[in-house]
């Protein structure tokens, strides 16, 4: 096999189209088989511009005059599919005259893969953004169901260990005659009213460093002292309670529906944990919660009742009066006090 035949075989094997043209008139001296397959076999009178008319004539002149390499990507459509070629044209000196060496490489598949990668990257970025938004929505939902420290534990370990908190205080609010109101009012109106009121209560609770635990129908339960210890937990829930009533009084002045509530306070120990496996609910149990729940029944409309053991924690900041003993089912005899407006404007709790 001759050297030229070997070179032709190698050029065909590596998939590179090669042509050699005269610099003077761009007529063909040589072309290999891949070049002819892609662009058609040049005739005797054909020039490089006839075969590849998209080449820039000025750039070709520049190659001939300066010897600078000319590189370009061209698209051709021999059949239905568009092909992309990387073409490099360089000047070479033969024994007799200057010639141009034209190297052509089919990069269609490379560009298709790059396009696929770009499309995939765009899709991944879009899906990632959607996942991040969904993650944020889930996080906001869970933070509405449980305190942040509990959520962090749940996110890290997948479970929440029940915790006993020795010193917490609880505020429990329940509306007067809610059942009758709900029966004679459009459900949409009832829900809208409760949503407005509980949203305002949430702001008050946050202002005084407490945690809203749950709402049960028209009942609203919040605590202070858990999951983070709070030295002034008793005064915190008392401030929330007085602010709840003040908000309702002002709201009633301008709204057609009048809301009245009873509020009970409790203090002592409580256990907090996530209840359920598929439908997560953070809940609290224990003496402090039981006390607040039972005492709100003994409160008159728009009044606050607390056990006497909270008296010394509240007496310096609130108007407190004795109500006497009552017998509470499951608890026994308890001395009660009435709590009303603060003696001075309270300072909201710092939030970190």
Image: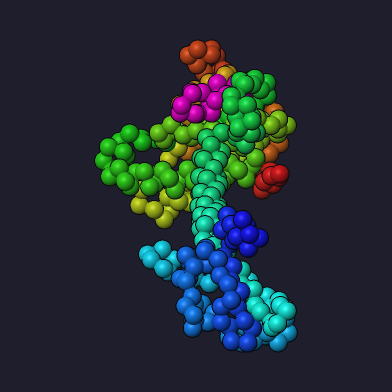
Residue 206 % position (x, y):
60, 43
Report the residue at 44% width, 66% height from top: 82
- Please, is residue 195 above or below residue 324 in the view? below
Q: How is the image coloured?
A: rainbow
Residue 161 % position (x, y):
62, 21
Find out whether residue 271 is within the magenta segment: yes
Quadrant of the image for the C terminus?
top right
Nearer to the camera, 338 or 48: 48
Find out whether residue 251 is within the magenta segment: no
Report the residue at 47% width, 43% height from top: 198
Residue 100 % position (x, y):
65, 77
Report the residue at 42% width, 50% height from top: 252
Nearer to the camera, 347 or 200: 200
Residue 310 % position (x, y):
65, 27
Nearer to the camera, 76 or 141: 76
- Please, is residue 29 above or below residue 312 in the view? below
Quadrant of the image for the N terminus?
bottom right
Q: Classify residue 60 by image quadrant.
A: bottom right
Q: Is residue 178 left or right of residue 102?
A: left
Report the residue at 58% width, 72% height from top: 30
Q: In this view of the protein, can residue 215 be seen by the observer?
A: yes
Q: In this view of the protein, can residue 319 be seen by the observer?
A: no
Q: Which residues are magenta?
A: 267-285
- As drawn, the residue found furthest toward the front would be 1
Q: Is residue 155 left or right of residue 281?
A: right
Q: Classify residue 226 by image quadrant.
A: top right
Picture mark count:
0
Dominant SS in magenta: strand
Q: Is residue 156 left or right of residue 122?
A: right
């Amino acid at each position: 096999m001759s050297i030229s035949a070997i070179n032709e075989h190698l050029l065909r094997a590596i998939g590179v189209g090669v042509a050699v043209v005269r610099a003077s008139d761009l007529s063909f001296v040589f072309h290999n088989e891949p070049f002819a397959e892609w662009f058609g076999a040049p005739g005797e009178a054909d020039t490089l511009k006839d075969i590849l008319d998209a080449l820039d004539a000025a750039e070709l002149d520049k190659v001939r005059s300066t010897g600078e390499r000319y590189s370009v990507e061209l698209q051709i459509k021999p059949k239905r599919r568009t092909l992309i070629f990387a073409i490099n044209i360089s000047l070479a000196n033969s024994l007799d005259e200057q010639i141009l060496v034209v190297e052509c490489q089919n990069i269609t598949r490379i560009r298709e893969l790059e396009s696929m990668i770009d499309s995939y990257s765009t899709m991944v970025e879009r899906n990632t953004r959607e996942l991040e938004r969904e993650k944020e929505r889930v996080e906001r939902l869970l933070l509405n169901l449980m305190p942040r420290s509990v959520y962090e534990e749940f996110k890290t370990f997948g479970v929440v260990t029940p915790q006993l908190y020795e010193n917490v205080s609880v505020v429990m609010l329940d509306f007067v005659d809610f059942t009758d109101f709900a029966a004679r009012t459009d459900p949409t109106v009832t829900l809208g009213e409760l949503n407005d009121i509980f949203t305002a209560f949430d702001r008050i609770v946050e202002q005084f460093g407490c945690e809203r635990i749950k709402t049960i129908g028209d009942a609203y339960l919040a605590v202070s002292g858990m999951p983070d210890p709070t030295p002034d937990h008793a005064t915190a829930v008392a401030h929330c309670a007085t602010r709840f009533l003040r908000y309702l009084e002002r709201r009633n002045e301008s709204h057609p529906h009048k809301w009245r509530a009873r509020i009970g306070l409790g203090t002592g120990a409580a256990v907090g944990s996530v209840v359920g496996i598929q439908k997560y609910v953070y809940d609290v149990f224990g003496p402090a919660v039981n006390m607040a729940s039972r005492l709100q029944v003994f409160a008159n409309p728009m009044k606050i009742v607390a056990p006497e053991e909270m008296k010394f924690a509240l007496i310096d900041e609130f108007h407190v009066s004795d109500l006497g003993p009552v017998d509470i089912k499951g608890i026994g005899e308890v001395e009660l006090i009435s709590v009303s407006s603060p003696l001075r404007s309270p300072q909201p709790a710092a939030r970190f």
